[in-house]
Amino acid sequence: MKRVAFPLVFVLCLVACITWTNTPVLAQGTDTTKPVSTVNNTLGARQTSLSFPVSVTGSDPGSPSSGVSSYDIYVAVGAGAFNYWTTVSAGSPSTTFTAVCGVNANNSIFFYSIAHDNAGNVEVHTTAEASTFMPDFCPPASTISAINSSSPAFALTFSASDFENDIRTVDLYAGVDGAAAQQVTFFYASGSVVNKVFKYPALADGVSHTYSFYTISKDTAGNTQLTPASGTTVTATFATATIRPLGISINNGFGTRSYVRYIKIPFTSQQNLGAIASRVRLTKFTLDGMGATIVPISSYVSQAGQSIVIDFGATDMGAAVPAGGSITSRWQQFIARDGYFQLAIDTRGNGRYQTVYYFHHLLGDVDGNGQVTQADQSYITKALSRPGSFDSSDVDLSGAIDTTDTAFLTKSKGRLLSSSLKLTAPANW
Ligand SMILES: [Ca+2]
Ligand SMILES: [Ca+2]
Ligand SMILES: [Ca+2]
Ligand SMILES: [Ca+2]
C-alpha cells in the first residue's frame, strides 16, 4: 500500500506545485492595460485649403506594456455624430484629411483617436480632442443651357449652382469669329441661379458670324469657377438692320437703385453708333414724376462695341459720393439724387427722340422695386459679412457693407417712387 500511496501524493503535490509556481509567471506576460492617445490639437482654427494634416500621439502605459500598434481616427462634421475615418500605424501616426465639397466642407470638423495595443487592448474614448473650421473653398458651377438666336437679340438661358447655395455673380463671356472671348456683362445673384437669361446683341450686317459663349460663376466666399475648355457656339446671319436700340441695363445687373453708376444700351448694329452716343438725353424728375432737369452726361457717354454706355465711374450719376459730416447731412445729400429718370435716344439724328427708357434712383432701394422697405434691410443684414466694393447692399458707396449702410437705409425707409410711374424692365445685356 505504501508503494501505491507515495506516487499519488507525489502527483497531487506536483499539480499543486506547478499551479502554485506558474501563476505569477503567467501574470507577468499578460498586458491587460488599455493604451491611451489623443489627436494633436494643432490643426489651427481655420484652414486655408481643403486638405490639412492630422496627427496622433499615444502610449501604452502599465506593466507589462505590449506597445501601441495603431490608432483609429474618428471624425464628426458640424453637429453630426462621430464616425470612423481611418487608421494610422503607431510608427507613422499622421495622415491628411481632405474635405469634400458638398459633404464636409464649409463646416467645423472634430476628431478623436482610439489606440490599439499589441495585446488587443483598445482605448475607450468618445469626445472631440481636436477641431478646426473648414471654410468654403468650393467653387460654383454654371452652364448655358439654351441659346435663342432667332433674332439679333440673342437670349442665353443659364443656370449656376454652388455647394453652399451662395452664388454671387455669373459673368457672360463672348467671342466672335474665333476671337478670344471677353466678358460682356454679368448677373448679380443671391443663393442659386436657375434658368435666368442673358441678352446679347448679335451683329446684323448681312454676314455669317460664329459666336462662342460661356459663363463663369463666383460665390460669396470668393471662389471662381474654372474657365471651361470650350464655349457653346452659334452661327447666324442677320440682314443689315436699321440701327435701333435693343434695351437697357442699369448697374450691370445689380438690382440696387441706391445709386446709378453704369447704364448700357445695346444696338442692332454699330453703324453710326458714335454719333448716336452724342444724341442721348437724360432727364430727371422727382419721385412723383414732377419737374424736369437735364442731367449732364456728355463726359460719361461713349460707344463700346455695339453698345452705348454711360459710365459714371466713381460718381453716382455724375455727383461725388458724399463723405464726411454727420449721417443726417450725408443722407440729405444722397437723397437729393433720388428721382425718376427718362433716358431718350435720337437714333436717326432728326431731333426727335424715338426711344425712351425709364429708371429710378432711390437711396436704400437695394432690390430696386421702387420702395425702401424691410426687405431691403434684410439684404444688407445678409451682406454684412461679405467683402466687395460694387455691391447692391453698399448703400453709401463706401466700398464696404457695414452698419452705416443700415443707418442710411433706416432713414430712407418708407420713401418710394410713385406707383403711377412706369419703369422699363432692365435686361442682363
Ligand atoms: Ca496595454
Ligand atoms: Ca462655394
Ligand atoms: Ca426695395
Ligand atoms: Ca457702405
Image (spheres, rainbow, N blue to C red):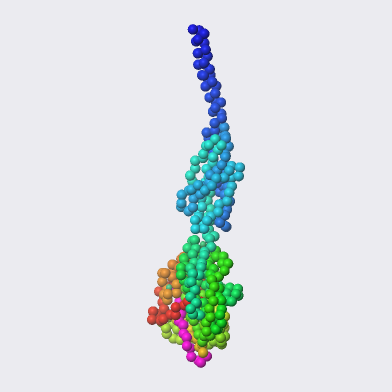
Camera-side residue of 210 and 112: 210
Give the camera-side residue of 314 and 328.
314
Query: x, y (%) of residue 286?
Result: 44, 82
Query: What residue occupies the far top of the structure in this picture?
Result: 1
* Of residues 397 and 72, the one drawn nearer to the viewer in this rendering: 72
Expressed as whole percent of the image width and height from the top left, the position of residue 219 reads: 52, 65
> Is any part of residue 97 visible from this angle?
yes
Q: Residue 324: percent from the left, percent from the top?
A: 53, 73
Residue at 49% across, 80% down: 151
Residue at image x 50%, y 77%?
149
Q: Residue at x 44, y 80 (%)?
A: 424
Q: Residue furthest bottom?
A: 350
Q: Residue 330: x, y in percent?
A: 50, 75
Residue for point 49% across, 46% down: 127
Q: Is residue 331 visible?
A: no
Please report the bounds of the magenta region as a residue range: 349-365
Marks counted in the figure total 0
Q: Is residue 68 above or below residue 340?
A: above
Q: State ligand 3's quadrant.
A: bottom left
Quadrant of the rendered structure where residue 309 is? bottom right
**Residue 129 magenta-highlighted:** no
Per the image, is 356 magenta? yes
Q: Is residue 352 above or below residue 47?
A: below
| Front one among 15 and 290 | 15
What residue occupies the far left of the structure in this picture? Answer: 420
